[in-house]
Image (tube, grey):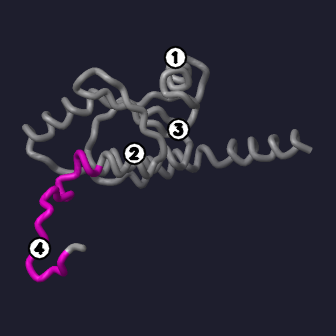
Amino acid sequence: MRFLIRTFFRGVRLILTPFMLIGERVSRPRGIERDPADQARIDEQTQRLALYHFPACPFCIKARRAMQRLSLDIELRNAQATGPWREELQNEGGRLQVPCLRIEEEDGSVRWLYESDAIIRYLRERFDPAQTTDPTPAPNSPPRS
């Protein structure tokens, strides 16, 4: 019975994969337009980031779309096939789960961030110009509790 279930889901994945990849390319979001100096600064910061992903994973597609929306040039590392990226994710990250954002900190330490929502939240907080860091409430807004 387990064999039948596994075969069924592999078949579904085989059929849906091309549609998911085509859909991702066709509906690619427009990125943020930044000043060239700002974009160069952000590109320099993203050199310390790498996204481990599977090409047709819906959660990976969600994370890649957020990267496109924010105009981030983050290295993509396909961990689906057996190889160095898969081994690195398993051995250094601790688990074979995608998407996973590898973050190299300024001090050289490495942090592994799993879950698409957590990755997107991190990218928005760090790179989205619309995110405000000013804790002062706007005029006529209710006080924070």
> How would you rate the neighbour count of disc 4 (Cα within 10 Å): few for under 14, some for 14-19, many for 20 or more?
few
Element type at marker 3? loop
- The residues bearing labels 2 and 3 have C-alpha atoms spaced at a distance of 11 Å
Q: Mark 4 or mark 3, which is nearer to you?
A: 4
Q: Quick one: label 2 or label 3, which is nearer the N terminus? A: 3
Which residue is tagged 4?
A: 138
Q: Residue at x 28, y 51 (%)?
A: 124
Q: Is residue 127 magenta?
A: yes
Q: Give the amino acid type for the residue marked by disc 4 in the picture.
A: Ala
**Distance in Å between CA atoms under marks 1 and 3:** 15 Å
Q: How many other residues sit within 10 Å of disc 2, few (<14), some (14-19) or many (≥20)? A: many
Mark 2 lies on residue:
119
Are the two marked residues, 4 and 3, in contact with CB atoms closer than 8 angstroms?
no
Label placed on residue 84: 1
Image quarter where the C terminus lies is: bottom left
Q: Secondary structure at mark 4?
A: loop
Check whether the beta carbons of the residues at disc 2 and disc 3 lie within 8 A of each other: no
Judging depth in this view, the residue of 111 and 50 nearest the camera is 111
**Dot placed on the residue nearer the N-terminal end, 2 or 4:** 2
Image location (x, y in percent) of residue 31: 26, 50
- Cα gap from disc 4 to disc 1, whole angstroms: 49 Å
Give left or right: position of 129 versus 25.
left
Give the mark, 4 or 1, whose residue is nearer the N terminus: 1
Segment tinted magenta in the rendering: 124-143
Mark 2 or 4, which is nearer the eye? 4
Foreground disc of the pair 4, 1: 4
Identify the main secondary structure in magenta: loop
Say which label, 1 or 2, has the lower sequence index: 1
Residue 97 position, x and y percent, is 56, 36
Horizontal side, residue 16 vs residue 102: left or right:
right
Q: Is residue 37 above or below residue 105?
A: below
The residue wearing badge 3 is 98
